Image (tube, rainbow, N blue to C red):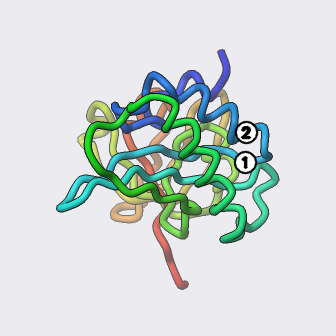
């Protein structure tokens, strides 16, 4: 199964765009970009956030974010998918980016990550640790707190994100 399809619900977290998300993601991909996450941030105003990176992992520019914003707006304007007013935000994942796909875990071997599991493993549901290894869709972490080694199937990970460390 395609890794994007396996992780669709982790990538597309904004229920308002689930129906149109495949079209959005394909259009974004055709321009050489990858959707990391789509989420709706609700505070005093709603913000539909598209976290995007270049497919070749090089730096994304403001000009490219503007181009993507226009493309996404055109697709969303075809039908009123989102009720009420909202802001559209296109951004890069940043330093403390979410780690969603297996390929991301492999890419960030040696990095520190904050992990939330779907179910307890060795009496832990949340921990911060070093991504040590990725083999057969299982991630090996070294817990920062007690240096315990945890081998977790990717399907058991609910959320993960990099932790910025200036060390």
Q: Residue furthest top?
A: 1
Q: Residues within 10 Å of mark 2 (few under 14, many from 20)?
A: some
Residue under numbered circle 2? 29
In the shown orientation, is residue 29 left or right of residue 73?
Answer: right
Label 2 element class? helix
Indicate the position of residue 122 as horizontal and vertical percent values: 30, 39
Q: Position of residue 164 (x, y in %)?
A: 49, 73
Question: Which image quadrant is residue 54 in?
Answer: bottom right
- Above or below, 90 against 62 in this view is above
* Residue 74 found in image quarter: top right
Provide residue 91's location: percent of width, then percent of height. 55, 62
Seen from the viewer's position, the closer of residues 165 and 69 is 69
Q: Which residue is mark 1?
A: 33
Position of 67 relative to 11 (above/below): below
Q: Residue furthest bottom?
A: 167
Q: Are marks 2 and 1 in contact (CB under 8 Å)?
A: yes
Expressed as whole percent of the image width and height from the top left, the position of residue 52 reads 61, 53
Q: Residue at x 54, y 46 (%)?
A: 73
Q: Nearer the viewer, residue 34 or 97?
A: 34
Distance between mark 2 and mark 1 Cα atoms: 5 Å
The residue lying at 50 percent from left, 26 percent from top is: 20
Front-most of 115 and 18?
Answer: 18
Dot 1: element = strand
**Which quarter of the rendering shows the N terminus?**
top right
């Amino acid at each position: 199964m395609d890794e994007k399809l396996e992780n669709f619900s982790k990538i597309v977290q904004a229920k308002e765009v689930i129906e149109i998300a495949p079209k959005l993601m394909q259009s974004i991909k055709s321009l050489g970009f990858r959707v990391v996450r789509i989420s709706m941030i609700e505070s005093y105003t709603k913000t539909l956030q598209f976290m995007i990176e270049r497919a070749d992992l090089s730096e994304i520019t403001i000009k490219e974010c503007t181009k993507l914003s226009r493309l996404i707006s055109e697709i969303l304007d075809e039908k009123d998918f989102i009720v009420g007013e909202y802001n559209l935000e296109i951004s890069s994942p940043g330093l403390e980016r979410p780690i969603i796909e297996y390929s991301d875990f492999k890419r960030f071997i040696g990095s520190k990550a904050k992990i939330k599991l779907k179910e307890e493993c060795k009496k832990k549901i949340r921990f911060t640790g070093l991504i040590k290894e990725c083999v057969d869709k299982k991630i090996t972490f070294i817990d920062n707190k007690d240096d315990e080694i945890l081998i977790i199937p990717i399907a058991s990970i609910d959320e993960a994100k990099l932790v910025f460390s200036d060390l």
